[in-house]
Image (cartoon, helix red, strand yellow):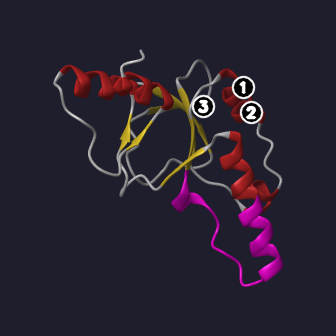
Amino acid sequence: MMTALLIGREPGMELGYRYVTEGSYDAVVIGSLSLSELLRFREERVLAALAEGKPVYLYTPGLPEAPKNRALSGSLTAAQRELKNWGVLFTDGGRKKLITAEEARILRSSGRQPAPGAMLTPLAKEIMEGTR
């Protein structure tokens, strides 16, 4: 099983990774963020992983509830948009199956395709397209 650096709480759903808090890792999973963390997100380990081309996932049920304050809600939406622009992949962990490179190799070798709505890591996508 591939390893993921865990930021915040562990997601409530299985995402297909064994979590570590230090050492080497294949991906990053952000399991939770507080309001202030989301608004001023600059986690060095996440930025380093993005710079290295490692997949970074944000578990959306771990995001704070939308506030009733419209201005604050707009700022949170803008912060989420910025993370997406950086390449952070949003997942709910349950409704969309996350396909890792390892799973993509198995699917491809058996001639199968991922289930509709599945989310593929960047490497898994390359494997399924036959470019890796």
Give the secondary structure at mark 1.
helix
Q: Which residue is mark 1?
A: 51
Give the secondary structure at mark 3.
loop
Q: What amino acid is found at the position of numbered circle 2 in the picture?
A: Leu
View extreme (top): residue: 132
Q: Nearer the viewer, mark 3 or mark 2?
A: 2
View extreme (bottom): residue: 68
User: Within 10 Å of the Cα at label 3, are there few (<14), some (14-19), or many (20+) other Cα atoms?
Assistant: few
* Location of residue 95 with respect to 30 vertically, above or below: below
Q: Are marks 1 and 2 in contact (CB under 8 Å)?
A: yes
Look at the image and say whether residue 61 sits in the magenta stretch.
yes
Figure disc tally:
3
Q: Which residue is mark 3?
A: 21
**Between marks 1 and 2, how big is the CA–CA gap?**
6 Å
Say which residue appears at 62% left-offset and 47% top-offset: 8
Seen from the viewer's position, the closer of residues 61 and 96 is 96
The answer to whether residue 131 shows anywhere in this view is yes
Q: Which residues are magenta?
A: 59-78
Q: Which mark sits nearer the N-terminus, 3 or 1?
A: 3
Give percent across and percent down for residue 81.
70, 56
User: Within 10 Å of the Cα at label 2, are there few (<14), some (14-19), or many (20+) other Cα atoms?
Assistant: some
Q: Which mark sits nearer the N-terminus, 3 or 2?
A: 3
**Between marks 3 and 2, how big is the CA–CA gap?**
16 Å
Q: What amino acid is found at the position of numbered circle 3 in the picture?
A: Thr
Q: Main secondary structure of the magenta part?
A: helix
